[in-house]
Image: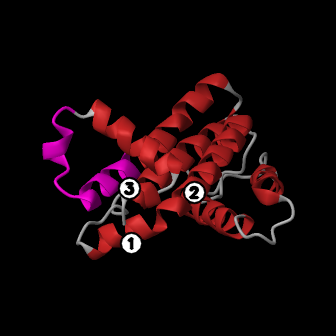
Amino acid sequence: MAMKDYSDEFKADAVALDESTPGAACKFPTREALIEAAYRNELARVCDSAAQRLADHAPDEALRLWMDDFIDYLAAKQGMADALRAAVASGADPFAETLDKLATAIGTLLRAGADAALLRRDMDPFDVGFSLAGIGLITSAPTSANGPAASSTWLLDSLRYGANGPASRW
């Protein structure tokens, strides 16, 4: 697959990663290695944005904004699907740290919301992450009428429900 076959988002990620990595041509000896690095770089950027969202917004609003960012990230990465499959087939594992990074980011947002009595304490970050991934998958389908906004609002409302109830986690 030639570089022209990748999404514009992926090409921009690859160029940004290449420009920010001294000796990138040596560091990424294959296209698959560059794909893996671009995927991990973008994932880290999305996960790291949770702290900034919390600094700028109330915890529940920070979570809503971060969920929007994450769903946008998922949509953009669908253009990388073939490239990621090729990377995995070559022996790379771009997903090795994905769940832990996502759970940490989501857990940070959930804890802040629970501490502010804005979000429930009994929600597992992995469950929220899997729900978001499902929303991203379902709402990317051509038959999705409302897109991800309605579904992520529903998810956030479910995280708010009973926020002042008894704590069962954390």
Q: Is residue 151 left or right of residue 46?
A: right
Q: Quadrant of residue 1?
A: bottom left
Dot 2 falls on a residue whose secondary structure is: helix
Identify the amino acid type marked 1.
Answer: Arg
How far apart marks 1 and 2 lie (CA) works out to: 15 Å
Magenta region, residue range: 22-41
Q: Position of residue 62 (x, y in %)?
A: 67, 36
- State the SS at label 3: helix
Q: Give the residue at x 61% y 31%.
A: 53
Tell me if residue 69 comes above or below residue 126 in the rendering.
above
- Dot 3: within a 10 Å radius of its alpha carbon, few (fewer than 14), some, or many (20 or more) residues? few
Residue of label 2: 74
Picture disc at residue 4:
none
For this view, does 135 lie left or right of residue 24? right
Which of disc 1 and disc 3 is earlier in sequence?
3
Q: Position of residue 52 (x, y in %)?
A: 55, 28
**Height in image: 115 above or below 143?**
above
- The residue lying furthest to the bottom in this view is 89
Mark 3 lies on residue: 3
Q: Which mark is residue 85?
A: 1
Is residue 151 in view from this perspective? no
